[in-house]
Image: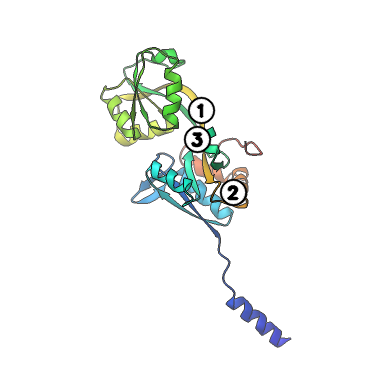
Amino acid sequence: MKSSLILFILFLACSPAVQAQELTLKTQDFPPYAYLIDDKLSGPAVEIIHATCEQADLECHMELLPWARAQDAVKHGKDNGLFVLAKTPERTAWLAFSYPLFEANYGFFVRSQNLLEYTAPSDISGYHIGVYGPSNTSKRLESIVSQAKGCTVEMRPDDEAGFKKLNHGRIDAVYSNKYVGDALISKMHLRMTRYAGTEGKVLYYLAFSKRNTEEETIKRFNEAYLKLHEDGSIAKILDTYNMKPVPIKCPIE
């Protein structure tokens, strides 16, 4: 009996430690959701994903890259997932989406002295409008301006450029996520810019590579997120950023 116990202890000592499954996830500089502070990746998306991975016993490594590079790495199977992004038919062909992490208003920012209160595409007829793109945001704007008259669109590869030009009166409006616009206005002290109204809402997700991530792993992440959502942990994280959790629909749509 004693010798059997010794052999069992030796077996445990020599067995390799069980390690949590690793996932590599990419994002872009996308305040207020994900951004760098002193070279440390921060923001509500980072905190939510970290907490969910911990709950699911997944070891998740997150990195910020230019968005084109981040998407390319996941598309070619080098990494497991992307955040924060909207769901589109093109993306669902190669990505499996989580529960929605955020809901955001999309609309128009204008100069402070502009009295516009946006309610319909006709309100921005004749406007020269800035937008980040190419992106899902710029595609949404293309659909809107097709319903207005005499609009022109100026696309830039970053959000800041458009807001700077608007603040200096070089364009008439910027189409953007309201959270993103408010964060940039605060960051860059753009006192001549305000939000003029909402055009629609967008849900944001974490999305996993179907090519490079097992279905069971995606299920574990989603089940862990649902648990944290139900016990109030997600709401607690978002409250520190003055955000609210997205109501959950089961199963995932």
Q: Please give the name of the residue rendered at 42% of the width and 43% of the height, measured from the top-left corner.
A: 34
Depicted 56 relative to depicted 171: above or below: below
Residue 201, label in figure: 1
> Residue 200 at x, y = what percent?
50, 24
Give, as a three-letter code, the residue at label 3. Ala
* Element at label 3: loop
Is residue 252 something that shows in the picture? yes
Label 2 sits on residue: 218
Label 2, label 3: how many angstroms apart (C-alpha)? 18 Å
How many other residues sit within 10 Å of disc 2, few (<14), some (14-19) or many (≥20)?
Answer: some
* Element at label 2: helix
Tag 2 or tag 1, which sits nearer the N-term?
1
Quadrant assignment, res 139: top left
Q: Please give the name of the residue rendered at 57% of the width and 43% of the height, measured from the top-left corner.
A: 96
Depicted 217 relative to depicted 207: above or below: below
Residue 18, label in figure: none
